[in-house]
Amino acid sequence: MNAVEPTTPGDPAREPITLGLHDASPQHLVDAMASDVVLELGWGRLIFGQTFAEPGVLADTLAHERPGRRDICIYARESHVLISRAPNELFIDPSHTYRLRFSEPHDEPRAHHGFTIRALQSPAEADEINRVFVRCGMVPAPTDVIWDNHLHADAVDYLVAVRDDDTIVGTVTGVDHRRLFADPEDGSSLWTLAVDPTAGLPGIGAALTEALAALFRERGRSYMDLSVAHDNSAAIALYEKLGFTRVPVLAVKRKNAINEPLFTPIPETVDDLNPYARIIADEAMRRGIRVEVLDAETGEMLLTHGGRSVITRESLSEFTSAVAMSRCDDKRLTRRIVGEAGVVVPRGRLATFDEADHAFLADVGDVVVKPTRGEQGKGITVGISSDEALDAALARAREQHPEVLIEQRATGDDLRLVVIDGKVVAAALRKPAEITGTGTHTVAELIEAQSRRRAAATGGESRIPIDAITKDTVAEAGWSFDDVLPEGTQLRVRRMANLHQGGTIHDVTDQVNPELCRVAVTAAAAIGIPVTGIDLLVPDVTRDEYVFVEANERPGLANHEPQPTAAAFVDFLFPGHPGLPQAWTAATVPE
């Protein structure tokens, strides 16, 4: 669902095609309809084109879009005439409009587990709606606009999906056309459907859509429209499953920085970049920096502005030296260097694959085994307390690299601090993959469903492996893959919090203790690396206790939105280059 997309009328097979009002509408109803209707929603304005009699007035209204906003004109009577009034400023949005007709038979809303759907209740929840928008890469709205619309605009409805722990994990906005401008078609529309990608619960997007449809159906509306990007196949499949059908209605937008990807060609193969390279490419293009993709599969790009050119591979650039890379690559060397700089490291030893390893385990009680070289959590086993488990973990790690490190396991949460040019620009807790029981699905089915959701939310980067470690983790909690997990029961299925192992990421930049930031900067300086992700184990992000885990020479900047990691990275590559006001342009895919 596009960040702020609309909806429209007309199915050629079933009703007369109009771009606003049907010819059959009684004239007295058309005359009673409000004129020149514009609705402020915070992220931009909804401009109802069928209420404008003159295309010149409509074009002038679009021309008054405020900076950083994304206005949408929907239901224009003659979109081609409107575009002709300002061809250098306006364009047809490449989205499809879908309609749910309430006159047709419909199924009862399906049952959902772990969350409830209800109306917005407080200004604090309006702020939480914005947090969901930002996590989905959407343009946020001022909280006071959302709350004022909720209190005073009876044509605007905000619904939220609330998890059983009272966390808002999804939202949708509805507009009642009848209440707004006496629409003779009795229409309504759905906007800004967003689901927190870390929610971990199935069916939130569908439940929000069905709840809004039920609200408008009860009011006697004729249909509910929505707009979705033409290439958003996952969202389109959901809407068609819910009974929506495509209708031939267009939306018109202004050519602004937020909408630029929709109306300008982008460098070839940029679309093939993974999210970690794409976020940097988007930030560079937004500033007018030329982007040439050298190898989309590896994320290699050549960025050029003026007389300066820089080659990057995701967040790794030619300004990271080979020495710094080798220091990060060898975890044993990393431990020694940061330890000598005063950073606290856990007790550890290089595995000798004999009784000395077992003696170390007996001494410390609980260990982590990891290959000295590797990434994405491959070959790492956490929480080993028996000789048999140690031998198995050593064998797994040795498959990745012949040298293996054994470390005392420290308690706490996995904290990633992104350091760019001597400053911490983002901090996030990384939590191991969890599933939530529905009372009807097996553990294996829930893992597979959660893995699909994580893959969809991360462009395929995050999946939960179905392997011996997952099986053992589930068994430790007293379950098996074939057991049906009771409704609401949460089960951790991996010990590691690594994103590539299905883990989730939770921003804590505003909460992290300054001492932890100082430690991260110290570690980066000791290694001699300008851009890095420093991993610590911490019992509480607001306190100063920690243990160093490792340093990553190529941190995934896309994992830390809405923090301006990509902007900081481009600032580092092109110091002094003027940036543009930050804006979010992506779309969210409802479940």
Image (spheres, rainbow, N blue to C red):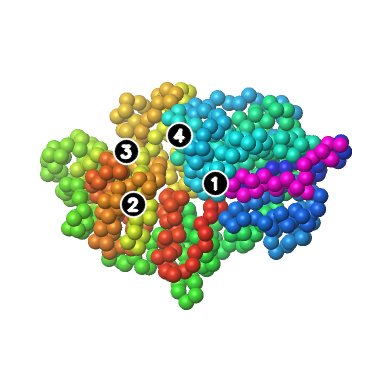
Of circles 2 and 4, the one toward us is 4
Residue where numbered disc 1 is placed: 142
Q: Which residues are magenta?
A: 28-52
- At 34% across and 31% down in the image, what residue appears? 474
Choose top left, top right, bottom left or bottom right for residue 88: bottom right
Label ID, residue 495: 3
Q: Residue at x 42, y 69 (%)?
A: 575
* Residue 494 to residue 69: above or below: above
Amino acid carrying mark 4 in the image? Thr
The residue under label 2 is 417
Q: Secondary structure at mark 4?
A: loop
Task: Name which residue lies at 33% across and 47% down.
Answer: 512
Residue to which mark 4 is pinned:
167
Tell me which label, 3 or 2, sits earlier in the chain: 2
Q: Is residue 193 shown left or right of residue 572? A: right
Mark 1 secondary-structure assignment:
loop
- Give the alpha-carbon distance from disc 3 to disc 4, as whole Å: 24 Å
Q: Position of residue 376 (x, y in %)?
A: 35, 49
Q: CA distance from mark 3 to mark 2?
A: 20 Å
Earlier sequence position, callout 2 versus callout 4: 4
